[in-house]
Amino acid sequence: MKLSRIPGHEPTVKHSFSLKKSTSDLLEKYHSLYQRVTGVEVPLKDVVEQMLLDFMSEDKTFQKELKKLVGAAEQKPSVRAEEDAPPVTQTTALAQQQEAI
């Protein structure tokens, strides 16, 4: 299957959205097939999350821009208040970019 193995758990953030019935039906079928092929029972939300992560990791334009964003954030800040802020990781940069949308 194209979907990567689903890793362990980390803190989550809740998102609410609706899908077309046809998309939801296909997603349920994919979820069922994934579990059958891998022999691992996983929640649907974990399958969806891994699909999104795989998609974003394969998007060359997104990865290029993300590296720029992370690189800029990792440069030494010139303002004292920024020095006290936690470092921006690839995960937090992605979350910040999603908030901007």
Image: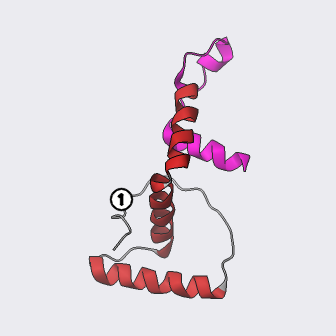
**In this orientation, does residue 91 appear?**
yes
Q: Quadrant of the N terminus?
A: bottom left
Q: Which residue position holds label 1?
A: 7
Q: Secondary structure under badge 1?
A: loop
- Can residue 100 be found in the magenta stretch? yes
Q: Locate residue 58, reporting x and y percent.
A: 45, 55
Colour setting: secondary structure
Q: Residue furthest front?
A: 61
Residue most extreme to the right: 101
On whether residue 1 falls in the magenta region, the answer is no
**Residue 86 visible in the current orientation:** no
Amino acid at dot 1: Pro
The answer to whether 17 appears left or right of 51 in the picture is right
Q: Is residue 79 above or below residue 12?
A: above
- Direction from residue 95 to residue 71 in the image, left or right: left
Residue at position x 61%, y 16% in the image: 77
Seen in the picture, residue 33 relative to 98 is either above or below; the reply is below
The x, y position of residue 63, in whole percent, is 50, 45
Query: In x, y percent, where is residue 21?
Result: 64, 87
The magenta stretch is 74-101
- How many badges with numbers are in the image? 1
